[in-house]
Image (spheres, rainbow, N blue to C red):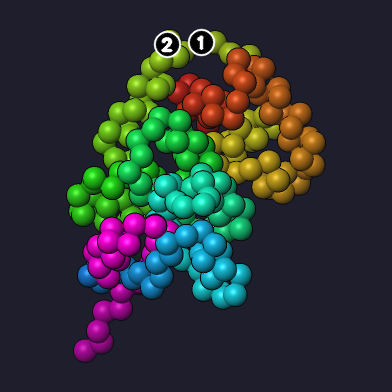
Amino acid sequence: MIAEIHATHSIWILEDHEVFAKQIRRLISNEEDLTCPHHFNNAADFFDRLKYSNDRPDLLLLDLGLPRRDGLQVLTDIRVILPDVKVLILTASDDRDKVYRAICNGASGYILKTADPDEILSGIRDVINGTSALSGTIAKMILEGFSRYGPVKHIEPLTTREEEVLRFLVKGLIKKEIADELSISQHTVDMHLRSVYRKLHVRSQTEAVSTALRQGLV
């Protein structure tokens, strides 16, 4: 009889709280389909590992409260260096601005450290399988954030290219990545974004993404 082979997904942790990181690593290692070979307590060690090794995670659990380097900046750098690696924020902060910036900068989910173990494992698997993962309080915050803008208003129609640029923006791509995907210059991407901002009556990437999602534009 041939034993059933399970696909194993590699989960890395970037978390400076040693005790919490060990707890999460132990939680992951008890699962047949998950493994946690690496834990880093600072961004420098994490990026050194990427630089000197071909080893890559399937998913990174990222804390935003890192020492010496802002977790959101780390997220931005990861999206450039490892565009195919999924990032799930696992942090203590429920600051509204950080939540929106993390999602807009390419995080596939946002879970609070107060979540129970089953919720964390479920979130990891959801992200690996291509969906998003949000703690209940974070999901409620996002919905309330959308409702602050009031009823959906009529907007000037976007061109096909503007819709493409906006769709990639919602996915968390930066301007260079959007330019590469569409085979256009970053200057042209900027031009389309300015037009998108004007038509949506917004002034930032965060507002553009929020409006696009709320109005079902992508």
- Badge number at residue 150: 2
Residue 14 sits inside the magenta stretch: yes
Q: 106 and 43: which one is in front?
A: 43
* x, y percent for residue 163: 63, 30
The residue identified by callout 1 is 153
173, above or below 13, in the image: above
Type of amino acid under label 1: Lys
Give the x, y percent position of residue 16. Answer: 39, 57
Asked if marks 2 and 1 touch (Cβ < 8 Å), the reply is yes
Residue plotted at (32% across, 33% down): 139
Residues drawn in magenta:
1-29
Quarter of image, res 24 = bottom left
Quarter of the image where one finds residue 49: bottom right
Residue 161 is left or right of residue 170, and the answer is: right
Residue 155 appears in the picture as rendered:
yes
Residue at horizontal 28%, vertical 33%?
Answer: 137
Q: Is residue 109 left or right of residue 6?
A: right
Residue type at numbered disc 2: Gly
Q: Is residue 130 visible?
A: no
Query: In the rendered view, does 130 fall on the left or right side of 48?
Result: left
Residue at 74% in and 32% down:
190
> In the displayed structure, would residue 2 be above or below residue 68?
below
